[in-house]
Image (cartoon, helix red, strand yellow):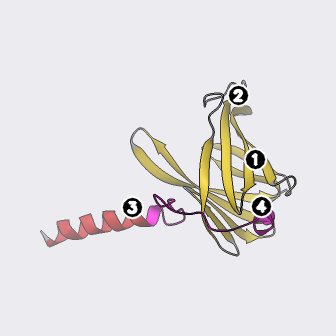
Amino acid sequence: MKNILLIIALVCFSSCIAQQNTLKFPENGIAPKANLNQVSWIQGHWKGEAFGGITEEIWSPPLGDSMMFSFKLVSDGKVVFYELGGIRQVDETLIFQLKHFGNDFKGWEEKEETIDAKLVKIEENRVYFDAFTFEKISDKEINIYVVIEENGKTEEVKFNYKKQ
């Protein structure tokens, strides 16, 4: 019986650790004050590997109260999907927004719909949006952690990128 309880405790502990790099925006919470200069280290051309393919993100420097990005996943020499979006300065805080597109550029979300992630917390080398975290490892390396929900399962996925 003690062994079963220990196994259950370890599984629960592992589940908590599996999502230790992302935060959830609290219900009725208020986003902290922040500006784009605090996250400008995200800008650049980044490449990595995930989902059995090559991932690429290109982030613009802050301009016009936003930083925009494009993302693509390439597997077996073919684009699987794209994302377009950005981080916008809204009032005195930041919001991360994106839209998905198939390899034919047909949108996954409805025309007027975006995936919006409010700012939860900002640190010197980490920016926490709801279910998304950007982490600066060095001037040449970043991690992006994303909570992905699929088929009733929730998983935190790490994207490691090197600057090109």
Label 2 environment density (alpha carbons within 10 Å; few <14, some 14–19, many ≥20) = some
Looking at the rendered structure, the kind of residue marked 1 is: Glu
Q: Which mark is residue 15?
A: 3
**Secondary structure state at the residue bearing disc 3:** helix
Label 3 environment density (alpha carbons within 10 Å; few <14, some 14–19, many ≥20) = some
| Chain-order first, disc 2 or disc 1 | 1
Q: Which residue position is annotated with label 2?
A: 103
Q: Are discs 3 and 1 less than 8 Å apart at CB?
A: no
Asked if one can make out residue 31 in the rendered structure from this viewpoint, the answer is yes
| Chain-order first, disc 3 or disc 1 | 3
- Position of residue 95 relative to residue 82, above or below, is below
- As for residue 20 lying within the magenta part, the answer is yes
Q: Quadrant of residue 74?
A: top right
The image shows residue 2 at horizontal and vertical percentages of 15, 72
**Secondary structure state at the residue bearing disc 1:** strand
Looking at the rendered structure, the kind of residue marked 4 is: Ile
Q: Distance from label 2 to label 1 (Cα)?
A: 14 Å
Label 4 environment density (alpha carbons within 10 Å; few <14, some 14–19, many ≥20) = many
First to last magenta residue range: 17-41
* Image position of 100 (left or right of 70): left
**Secondary structure state at the residue bearing disc 2:** loop
Looking at the rendered structure, the kind of residue marked 2 is: Asn
The image shows residue 65 at horizontal and vertical percentages of 81, 54
Looking at the rendered structure, the kind of residue marked 3 is: Ser
| Chain-order first, disc 3 or disc 2 | 3
Q: Which residue position is annotated with label 1?
A: 56
**Secondary structure state at the residue bearing disc 4:** helix
Task: Name the image quarter holding the N terminus.
Answer: bottom left
